[in-house]
Image: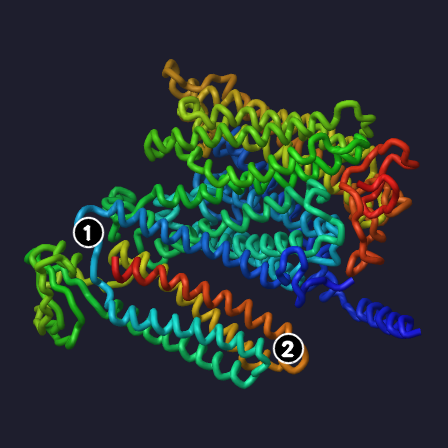
Amino acid sequence: MQATTHAIPHAHIGEAHHEEAGFWSKYVFSTDHKVIGLQYGITALSFLFFGFCLMLVMRWQIAHPSQPVPLVGPLLAATFGNMAVNGAVSADLYNSFGAMHGTIMVFMAIVPLAFAAFGNYVVPLQIGAPDMAFPRVNMASYQAYVIGGLIMFVSFFVPGGPAQAGWTSYSPLATSIPTDGQTFWILGMVFLITSSLLGAVNFIATIIQLRAPGMTWMRLPFFVWAQFVTAFLLLLAFPPLEAAAVMQLMDRLAHTSFFLPTGLAVGGTLANISGGGSPLLWQHLFWFLGHPEVYVLILPAMGIVAEIIANNTRKPLWGYKSLVYAVLILGFLSFIVWAHHMYLTGMGTRVATFFQTTTMIISIPSVIILTCMFMSLWGGSIRFNTPMLFVMAFLPMFGIGGLTGLPLGFNYSDLHLHDTYYVIAHFHYIVAPGTIFAMFAGVYYWFPKITGRMMNEFWGKVHFWTSFVFMNAVFQPMFAQGMAGMLRRMADGGANYSQAKVPGAIGGLSASIMGLHTYILWAAVCLGLAQIPFIINLFWSINNGKKAGSDNPWQATTLEWQTPTPPPHGNFAKPPVVVRGPYEYSVPGHATDFTPQNQAGSTAE
Amino acid sequence: MDIPYTVQPRADTGLYNAKLGIWLFLASEVMLFGALFSSYILLRVSAPEGYWPHGWLNIPIGTCNTIVLICSSITTVMAWASCKMNRFGRFKFWHACTILLALTFVCIKSYEYHDKFTHFEFTLKDGTYADGHILEDKADSLVIHGRRVADRKELFDLRAPGVKIVNSEITIPKDQIQKQERYGPWHHTYLAIYFTLTGLHALHVIGGAIVIGFLWGPLSKQWQTDPERFTNRIEVSGLFWHFVDLVWIFLFPVLYLL
């Protein structure tokens, strides 16, 4: 009797609370981890699209230097004035777009999408928690991200245009460059760093504190492990960049000389500074973030890949414990490899030797992870649905990206390849057909949990095959261009160094190497068009997709599928108790080929 | 489902959520200040011989501020212990002391900043230097309390053995001044890192004081409704406060003594 009187008012309060929640508190100022995850996802996908558009303009400029850009030329001329006369991209504007493409893609698209969006939506569900540990901090994290993003966006409209010194913002160039865009860049970064910091604290606290009863560390889905390590990287690697950003801000606004050496000349005249600073200091602080950041980009993707592989091969992940230890070691090692980005700075050969060694060591856990995933496919009866196709492409694409990184990690081969298109091709293979493919896989995979409907399989496959072909068409030729000696960040795409410009010069770029620019441009345009089926499919399926049929359409074992669809505020109808590991697929003697983590039964460990 | 372990500790970790959260936050703060301290080391070791200043800061004032902050740490512990012992009145007293000590620290720090911003180095047209605070700004000359030196290097090491700094009232004709510069962050890389480190630290002190002020004032109503949670909040804010003190314990020797 007492129990019922207790329960009924409680349920009533819950319902009333939900009805009262208006549009603003439900969708904009929400503290629900699922809504925040979706907010992050939508915002990050928008930035991803924006960053892609900047890149298309740059590709046009590289292939057709100083020719007016088709379609958006008048818009560029109206927005940037004499930086885009007649709609043609000037060198300054090219530099701006290059810097902002990198910044947007790394800090405002991929990290928020891979870490914050997927992590927010999925991690609390997978560990059986009602929400994140600090829901209001979570909301603040999203708001800081939006403010940072807006500051970056506004910088496109300040006199002189946005930051021009690359996404790395090397000083003294970034300090002495005469545009306020760089100051906006720094301020925007401070907000984005704050956002990551709040998110990281929240994720770690959630994973440590809010695991459901029975969810021991070795029963965590690999995705949670990946996010856990990612959160530590963000927590510890971002603050040094924040310190560096503060110092660069001081250099720009208070005229200090943290990164400005004695005797610095700008535009041919001696700069009026106290001097005594160190340009190398910026690079050390930047890459101390920059390299762990690479793993921030890839680890959540690996987590998604692991989930989808186990689900679609209907087998446990091969070497779950090896995966966990490898990802922990990877996280640790990623803090001591940063200076392999700086072999050519003159920091000294001994330092270079140390970082070359650690760089080679860090490839071991990466190889372990990839090998475990390949081995997981062995002997599986694989379901080739859209998420699985993206995952199957991820494996070799990430492999290409990783293996082409080795020559960059050795400092003698890096002498030749440093700062060329080879580097661009290398890291884009990791991030574009690697991370972004895993993101697509994740969207197709978790969409039915969010909406209760499936995305269209046919158009999903069209999206996959076209993206797969054109991704490779875009990035594969860049290896050749880079090995031929074409440097990155040249507004004319290297035309000044071509054999056409200087006939007979040794090392001039040949006509066939230069001709690849046109080919890459159209491949990139096609890659853009290939995303149209995805965008339409994504929005159309929300209301018109095939009904998922159950709460667990993929017949998965992890906890996020053992909730109502979509999960209500508080997630679980009754608190889950975990009794088994995350990937109990095809257990012999069991009635179904999957056993959810919270399903009691004789096959429990 | 409600979020568990908001007040009571989880059995296997022994922590409630916010306590773990603040420790993680402090870990990232360690990396933030760690990066700045590393920058300090790098800038100092790469400075040319004789150009890294010694003795530019006033050690008695710095010591005084160190004592102020250490005392505030003690009052913070006492405030938390008072909550634990169910003595709300004592809590109010101790944390009032904490806030006053924080304000004292900020006042003393501003005095030091003010002293630096009113300190000038003059480059004179005859190749010598003058250095000091302006006492009087006349039509054609400046009266300063300071000294004149032949070599700029003499301005850097005020603690070199055998050197006695004698400041006196001197008059400099304005037409002899080639350049005058305040001891702001732009003046020397040492001052740049000094202002950045202590400025960032001062922001932490002010932020911490605001949080503690809120807990002391409007938020202390929670003592009546949920004393356990309120005590946890005092503990968490106290951990942050101890960290801020600890940063100063590193800053003081690094910037003032070394």
> How dense is the environment of label 2, judged by Cα within 10 Å: few (below 14), some, or many (20 and up)?
some
Residue A96 — which label? none
Image quarter where the C terminus of chain A lies is top right
Separation of marks 2 and 1 at Cα, in angstroms: 56 Å
Instruction: Residue type at mark 2: give it.
Output: Pro
Given residues A472 and B107, the one toward you in this image is: B107
Label 2 element class: helix
Identify the mark nearer the N-term, 2 or 1.
1
Q: Quadrant of residue A524?
A: top right
Q: Which residue is mark 1?
A: B51
Residue beneath the point at 46% across and 17% down: A510
Given residues A348 and B221, the one toward you in this image is: B221
Q: Which label sits in the foreground, 2 or 1? A: 2
Q: Is residue A85 visible?
A: no
Whether labels 2 and 1 share one chain? yes
Q: Determine the residue located farthest toward the bottom in the rendered image.
A: B89
> How dense is the environment of label 1, judged by Cα within 10 Å: few (below 14), some, or many (20 and up)?
some
Given residues A209 and A125, the one toward you in this image is: A209
Label 1 element class: loop
Image quarter where the N terminus of chain A lies is bottom right
Instruction: Residue type at mark 1: give it.
Output: Tyr
Q: Give left or right: position of B166 versus A463.
A: left
Residue beneath the point at 46% across and 36% down: A337
* Chain bearing mark 1: B
Residue beneath the point at 43% across and 69% down: B205
Q: Which residue is mark 2?
A: B227
Vertical arrangement, residue A292 with respect to residue A39, above or below: above
Q: Position of residue B162 (x, y in %)?
A: 8, 59
Q: Give left or right: position of A604 versus B75.
A: right
Q: Position of residue B196 (x, y in %)?
A: 36, 59
* Chain bearing mark 2: B
